[in-house]
Image: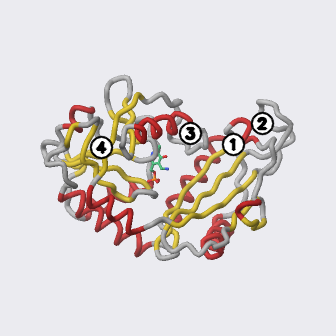
Amino acid sequence: MSRWAYVNGRFHPHGEAVVHVEDRGYQFADAVYEVWAVINGRLADFDGHMTRLGRSLDELRIEHPMSGASLLNVLRETVRRNRVRFGLCYIQISRGTARRDHPFPDPAVAPSVVITCKSLDRGAMETKAKKGVAVITQPDIRWGRCDIKTVGLLPNILAKQAAKERGAAEAWLVDDMGFVTEGSSTNAWIVDADGNLRTRDTQANILRGITRGNLLAVAKDAGVKVIEKPFTVEDAKQAREAFFTAASAFLTPVVSIDGTRIADGKPGPLTTRLRGLYFERAAELAV
Ligand code: PMP
């Protein structure tokens, strides 16, 4: 089936879609991105991801290329053209194309916009979630502004590759104090020894995951006690349950950390329950 990509105002066959060699996203990683889950052909939490995208752009003083309403139209058209029912939709916005020089282009140039979609195998994701996945830990070597969703993902990529080479699905990043910050592309959670659902607070140098924020609300509505408090790798190994969240993973149960089995080595009951509740809510609210 033919795939389409949106680049700077036009749709192109995916294989022919290109940006300029002097695009600042390519030259400097001077660009931000955002990711929406697509459920039943609709975008999950459009507003949440849109708000974070606006904030990422503002923090880096990159111009907003279009209104939220226009962006929703283009994203929907990209989903439609690619016939995605269940999958992911990505946008990358760079500061634009200009002769290579570190400071911002002066006068400013138009930001570059790329939008792509891909289908995911829902059955395979469900099978993975039923079994649970392994994670490893890696030192968190990222910069100090992980709250901004930039395309500068090299430390994340190295961590994910290390995980893959050790047969794990994700790498949990660990700060200098020994606390888990988040995953290389997900937020990290445990159900601690006292039965509290626990994840890192957003004062820390982490991405404020949209799935994370929504899950906090789902958990509170379900009467689950949640605390936003750092946990160590040892806390995680002794946890009753563990999982990670992202638009690309929903809630994915974790059954081992650095080779140590979590509890009985199966996805935990609270994780499984919350995964169901989360998915229902996300599907209902998708636009
Ligand atoms: N942390 C990092 C480093 C990520 O890259 C992502 C996914 N983009 C997340 C957390 C999860 O964020 P979200 O729930 O908004 O997908």
Residue with the mark numbered 4: 228
Q: Position of residue 129 (x, y in %)?
A: 31, 59
Of badges 1 and 3, nearer the viewer stands 3
Residue contact at pointers 1 and 2, CB within 8 angstroms: yes
Q: Amino acid at mark 2?
A: Phe
Mark 4 or mark 3: whose residue is earlier in sequence: 3
Q: Amino acid at mark 3?
A: Leu
Picture layout, residue 103 above or below residue 64: above
Residue with the mark numbered 3: 153
Q: Position of residue 192 (x, y in %)?
A: 18, 43
Mark 1 or mark 2: whose residue is earlier in sequence: 1
Of badges 4 and 3, nearer the viewer stands 3
Residue with the mark numbered 1: 61
Mark 4 or mark 2: whose residue is earlier in sequence: 2
In-image side of 20 versus 277 (left or right): right
Q: Amino acid at mark 1?
A: Arg
Marks 4 and 3, how far apart at CA: 25 Å
Q: Name which residue lies at 60% across and 38% down.
A: 152
Of badges 3 and 2, nearer the viewer stands 3
Tell me the number on the disc at residue 104.
2
Circle 3: element type: loop
Q: Name which residue lies at 31% across and 50% down.
A: 133
Q: Position of residue 172 (x, y in %)?
A: 37, 38
Marks 4 and 2, how far apart at CA: 37 Å
Circle 2: element type: loop
In-image side of 37 versus 16 (left or right): left
Picture layout, residue 124 above or below residue 227: below
Circle 4: element type: strand
| Crowd band around label 2 with a 10 angstrom C-alpha radius: few (<14), some (14–19), many (20+) | some
